[in-house]
Image (tube, coloured by chain):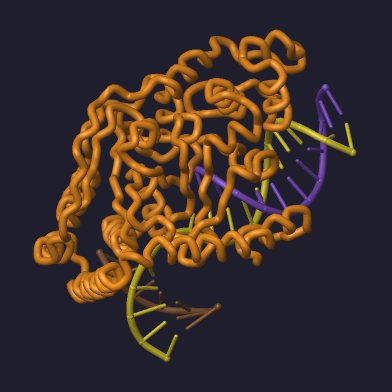
Chain colours: A orange, B yellow, C purple, D brown
Amino acid sequence: MGITKLADLIRLDAHDAISHKDISDYTGKVIALDTSIVVNQFRAATPALSPLTGLFFRTLTFLEHGIKPVFVFDGKPPGEKAAVLEKRAETAGWRFSNRTGIASSQTKDCLQLLRLLGVPFIQAPGDAEAMCAWLVRAGTVDAVASEDMDSLPFGANILIRQLNAKKDSEVIEYSLPKLLQKLQISHEEFVDLCILLGCDYCDKIAGLGPRRALTLIQKHRTIENVVLNVNRKTHPVPLFWKYKEARKLFLDAPQIETPELVWTEPDEEALVKFLCHVKYVKEERVRSRMEKFRKTREEREKEKAAGCTKQTKMEDFFRVTRKRGQPVEAADSLSSNTKRPKSK
DNA sequence: ACTCTGTCTCAAGACGCT
DNA sequence: TTGAGACAGAGT
DNA sequence: AGCGTCC
């Protein structure tokens, strides 16, 4: 799923587009999340239990940091993606791939949970990633947080990965403008690059990896020109290649009006009723988490009230210290580390 | 020498107690 | 299950 | 930090 080798390409060829952040850097920001990605993470990590509790805990963590989350739900997947979905559903033993866009019971549970948490959600007409990116472009949200890179070709200026990371500097922010500037290509050319790398919407040219794809796009600017200038015998173009349709999906914004987003206080009693009495979560767990939530919220309110004038200065201070501590990472890139993300 | 592909392996969330 | 890292092997 | 439990 996604554009797998894109993360590596950015790390190697456009490192300037990456910055390491902390979750507290996003206080006050509105951030869109692809719900299916989040839920799938919880399902993969703990297949035995419900992803609802994970969603509950993580959302509260966001709120504690003053982040305003918006959860985006997948709609009807575009026809081009059907092939991928069918294959995935088949191997998973699933008999129904979601062609209709009708909410499953799991989806309804998520909606209910978010409603009780007072967090807004949006039903995307098609791909949730596309909708998230559009929300950024429209200025409705500040950034999109996701684990796969699709948002970038969809046009999201800011993509955040690992926003849930506990440790500092493991939150990674990608800047699309910086990326395009560094690679010296336009957004349209970047979309063509992503198609060549391999996306969910069409085949790729076998034998063309990230290295050559980037060079070719930088030289010839479009897929059409790349095809004309590549050895067709060693790199045969796929039959019935739907690259134009894929390109259109990335570039055309989903047509939907963005509703007004409202955040309200979580309804603790209703949450207990839902999670504990319907979903059999231990009440103590929900209660204690809510208590911690209220506490950190009070702390935050106190801080805000105490230092209105100092607020900006404080943020600037933290920003500077983080930038100073950062070049340590860059010097690392050529060393032979076996464990890349975990090593300091 | 460099690039791409295939195969393998492993870890993946969040909490609370020690 | 999927994705990312390490490695071996074939191709340019 | 490490480890068992959550459902």
Task: Kindly identify the residue that appears in the image at 57 percent across and 28 percent down.
Answer: A194
Q: Nearer the viewer, residue A181 or A276?
A: A181
Eyeballing the image, is A84 above or below C6?
Answer: above
Q: Nearer the viewer, residue A219 or A198?
A: A219
Q: Quadrant of residue A131?
A: top left
Q: Is residue A33 left or right of residue A260?
A: right
Q: Is residue A270 left or right of residue C10?
A: left
Q: Nearer the viewer, residue A37 or A157?
A: A157
Eyeballing the image, is A176 above or below A276?
Answer: above
Eyeballing the image, is A193 above or below B13?
Answer: above
Q: Is residue A212 left or right of residue A107?
A: right
* Numbered-mark total: 0
Task: Kindly identify the residue that appears in the image at 72 percent across and 32 percent down.
Answer: A211
Q: Position of residue A10 (x, y in %)?
A: 63, 40
Can residue A282 be seen? no
Q: Position of residue A327 (x, y in %)?
A: 68, 59
Task: Kindly identify the residue that appears in the image at 32 percent across and 45 percent down.
Answer: A35
Q: Position of residue A94 (x, y in %)?
A: 35, 37
Eyeballing the image, is A89 above or below A27?
Answer: above
Q: Position of residue A127 (x, y in %)?
A: 36, 30
Can residue A28 be seen? yes
Q: Quadrant of residue B16?
A: bottom left
Q: Is residue A154 left or right of residue A292?
A: right
Task: Kindly identify the residue that appears in the image at 19 percent across and 73 percent down.
Answer: A287
Q: Quadrant of the C terminus of chain A?
A: bottom right
Q: Nearer the viewer, residue A231 or A191?
A: A191
